[in-house]
């Protein structure tokens, strides 16, 4: 059997649609599994006016079930004479069986209950409204006098199981089998408002039915159609369209029936930096810019309309864009009158964060921390000067009219203004790169200066915000601290920057002292930030295919982010070695025994038996080998060295009584094992790693 659920709404913001469709599918899968309904396929389709769920391969009804319902203890269910009590009678009644049919097992009363499976149609009648209500909504609204909340007012519901309507009511709307087409389908307004009946919930039938009334409901089909249309328009203009994934997805969910046209603007606007023009077209108007073969912007764009078949729409869009670009040109010409370096004092009037000063002070802290990081990264004197100048100017573009109008241009326009102000290309590039990465898939800084200032900026934000208690909770992160931590992780791992986070936090906090006073918040801040970074690093390592238990084992200490990443990879790589389970089990056994060990210093003179002397001698050798391997960051070599301890440890535990009645011998043997535990922990907490057997 097949089933269809379509929810027709007022316009849903395009940015929410991918998440809604994903969540709709997941909630449906969870609900069907809970209700014991199997299926062969689930698909979600949608536009800004509708969310659709299609399910294939459903059974006609739930399976009949035979369940053993557990009741009260036997001593409560029966009196000493064996007669059923009120507890037994009540339990039997609640399960729909006679009290004589109760069974006693394991000192409890059980009732065998035969549960007849409901028809799929009845199950879906309860499940469909539940699924709709469970969809995560970043914001919701009420409308009319309806006591129901959804992202936008609901206008129609289609719910079918086979050819039958699944009967339920939601927000005052009764589910039926009639959908609505494109807002402007049909030859007249009255025709456009008519409903179209859906008889068969088959995916292809559903798509074809909607296509006839002006709706391409499959978002992937719509996206590919838009891509081809835009490319074709650009080809006609002898240019190439800039079709970026984020803009393409947004436009996909802004239309139900895409039609593309080419527009143009005055060539005089090409004097404005290319990034400004592209940003204005993409962000404000949702246009696709065009470039020539050399990658230089041309004075044309592609606009995708929603079913508009009149080319007069191009005139309107050209007028709107011309007005926007006129503003941008004015801002650009005004901003150019003042060199970027003269804007630095203006940063004193731009706040950073409550109790954390202004942007001028932040730039000063970034410069100091950037210099320290640069030295740790082996910068030359020339690189340090570039880093210093980059930090001084990196926030100056926040005072420009252009950034005020187009906040997404910060850094991008800063680079252009730096070049126009006579700054070096290295400084200008650093200004741009210190904002990278701006999101999870964004590019990373290429220059070492950009890396250092990008790290300094993010660490400064984390330390300051954590110091005043502005820590993200739940899904709320208004200050972008998760994004900052993720940027630190990506830069350090992908650019192989080996730094200790506790040292970076120490230095950053030192520069905050004039604002934070003498009270020492550092221990708390350090612990919280390291935990915060570990929480962000975990999904990064999991996405790389590292096993969850190995990730947990290395994240007990994420002070060195790069080391954590390399260690996790080495552990994953060597987990299939024959000797690896022995290392894990030995580490676990050692950790269990040494709890409460009073010391870890071994007194060699107190080693009485050959097996413990041999183990100590081997420990000294392996300890040196592991230390040298760690210095060289050869984690696989370090792991292999630990494997040398496995058999001798088995012999030690077989022959030596650790908890000897002689306190001197016992303490010394515990100290030996404590030293071994410390050695294992230099690599990972092996107790968290799962091995077979």
Image (cartoon, grey):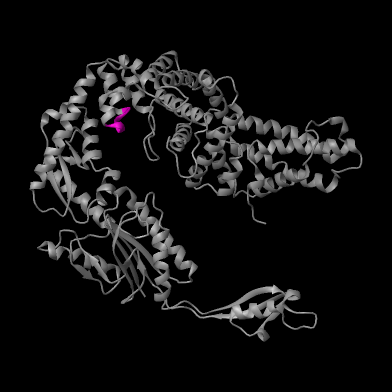
Residue 468, above or below 348: below
When asked about the image quadrant of residue 657, the answer is top right
Residue 472, above or below 4: above
Q: Quadrant of the C terminus?
A: bottom right
Task: Using the image as rendered, state which of residue 328 and residue 367 is in the foreground.
Answer: 328
Q: Is residue 303 left or right of residue 364?
A: left
Residue shown at 69% from the left, 30% from the top: 624
Q: How many marks?
A: 0
Is residue 407 inside the magenta stretch?
yes
Q: Is residue 462 left or right of residue 349?
A: right
Residue shown at 18% from the left, 46% from the top: 231
Q: Position of residue 261 (x, y in %)?
A: 13, 47
When asked about the image quadrant of residue 162, the answer is bottom left
Q: Quadrant of the N terminus?
A: bottom left
Q: Position of residue 448 (x, y in %)?
A: 42, 24
Task: Using the image as rendered, state which of residue 516 and residue 457 is in the foreground.
Answer: 516
Q: Which residue lies most toward the front here?
A: 145
Task: Using the image as rendered, state which of residue 610 and residue 137 is in the foreground.
Answer: 137
Q: Position of residue 639 (x, y in %)?
A: 64, 40
Q: Which residues are magenta?
A: 406-411
């Amino acid at each position: 059997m097949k089933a269809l659920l379509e929810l027709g709404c007022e316009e849903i913001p395009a940015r929410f649609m991918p998440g809604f469709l994903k969540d709709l599918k997941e909630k449906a899968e969870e609900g069907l599994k809970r209700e014991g309904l199997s299926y062969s396929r689930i698909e979600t389709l949608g536009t800004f006016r509708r969310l659709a769920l299609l399910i294939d391969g459903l059974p006609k009804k739930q399976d009949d079930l035979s369940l053993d319902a557990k009741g009260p203890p036997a001593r409560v269910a029966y009196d000493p004479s064996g007669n059923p009590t009120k507890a037994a009678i009540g339990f039997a009644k609640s399960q729909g069986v006679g009290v004589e049919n109760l069974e006693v097992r394991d000192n409890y009363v059980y009732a065998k209950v035969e549960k007849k499976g409901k028809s799929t149609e009845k199950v879906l009648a309860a499940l469909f409204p539940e699924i709709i209500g469970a969809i995560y909504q970043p914001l919701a609204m009420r409308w009319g006098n309806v006591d129901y909340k959804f992202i936008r007012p609901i206008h129609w519901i289609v719910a079918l199981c086979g050819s039958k309507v699944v009967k339920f009511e939601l927000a005052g709307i009764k589910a039926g089998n009639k959908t609505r087409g494109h807002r402007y389908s049909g030859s007249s307004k009255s025709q456009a408002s008519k409903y179209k009946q859906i008889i068969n919930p088959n995916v292809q039938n559903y798509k074809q039915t909607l296509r006839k009334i002006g709706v391409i409901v499959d978002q992937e089909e719509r996206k590919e159609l838009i891509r081809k249309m835009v490319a074709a328009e650009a080809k006609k203009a002898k240019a190439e369209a800039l079709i970026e994934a984020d803009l393409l997805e947004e436009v996909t969910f802004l239309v139900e029936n895409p039609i593309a046209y080419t527009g143009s603007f005055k060539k005089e606007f090409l004097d404005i930096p290319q990034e400004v023009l592209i940003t204005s077209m993409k962000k404000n108007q949702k246009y696709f810019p065009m470039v020539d073969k050399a990658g230089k912007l041309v004075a044309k764009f592609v606009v995708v309309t929603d079913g508009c078949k009149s080319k007069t729409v191009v005139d309107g869009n050209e007028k709107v864009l011309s007005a926007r670009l006129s503003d941008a040109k004015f801002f650009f010409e005004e901003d150019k009158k003042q060199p970027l370096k003269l804007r630095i004092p203006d940063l004193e009037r731009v706040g950073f964060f409550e109790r954390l000063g202004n942007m001028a002070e932040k730039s000063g802290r970034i410069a100091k921390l950037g210099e320290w990081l640069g030295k740790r990264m082996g910068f030359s004197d020339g690189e340090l000067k570039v880093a210093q100048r980059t930090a001084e100017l990196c926030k100056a573009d926040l005072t420009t009219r252009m950034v005020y109008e187009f906040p997404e241009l910060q850094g991008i326009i800063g680079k252009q203004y730096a070049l126009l102000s006579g700054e070096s290309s290295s400084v200008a590039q650093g200004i741009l790169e210190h904002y990278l990465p701006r999101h999870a898939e964004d590019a990373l800084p290429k220059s070492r200066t950009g890396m250092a200032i990008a790290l300094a900026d993010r660490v400064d934000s984390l330390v300051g915000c954590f110091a005043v208690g502005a820590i993200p909770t739940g899904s709320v992160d208004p200050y972008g601290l998760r994004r900052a931590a993720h940027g630190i992780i990506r830069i350090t791992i992908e650019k192989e920057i080996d730094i200790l986070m506790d040292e970076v936090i120490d230095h950053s906090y030192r520069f905050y002292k004039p604002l934070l006073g003498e009270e020492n918040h550092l221990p708390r801040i350090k612990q919280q930030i390291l935990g915060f970074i570990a929480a962000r690093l975990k999904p990064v390592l999991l996405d790389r295919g590292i096993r969850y238990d190995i990730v947990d084992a290395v994240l007990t200490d994420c002070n060195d982010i790069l080391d954590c990443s390399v260690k996790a990879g080495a552990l994953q790589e060597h987990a299939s070695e024959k000797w690896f389970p022995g290392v894990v089990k030995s580490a676990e056994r050692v950790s269990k025994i040494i709890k409460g060990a009073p010391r870890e210093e071994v007194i060699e003179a107190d080693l009485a038996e050959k097996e413990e002397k041999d183990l100590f001698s081997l420990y000294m050798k392996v300890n040196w080998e592991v230390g040298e391997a760690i210095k060289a960051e050869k984690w696989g070599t370090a792991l292999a060295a630990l494997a040398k301890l496995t058999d001798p440890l088995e012999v030690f535990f077989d022959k030596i009584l650790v908890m000897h009645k002689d306190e001197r011998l016992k303490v010394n043997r515990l100290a030996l094992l404590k030293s071994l535990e410390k050695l294992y922990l230099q690599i990972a907490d092996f107790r968290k790693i799962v091995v077979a057997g």
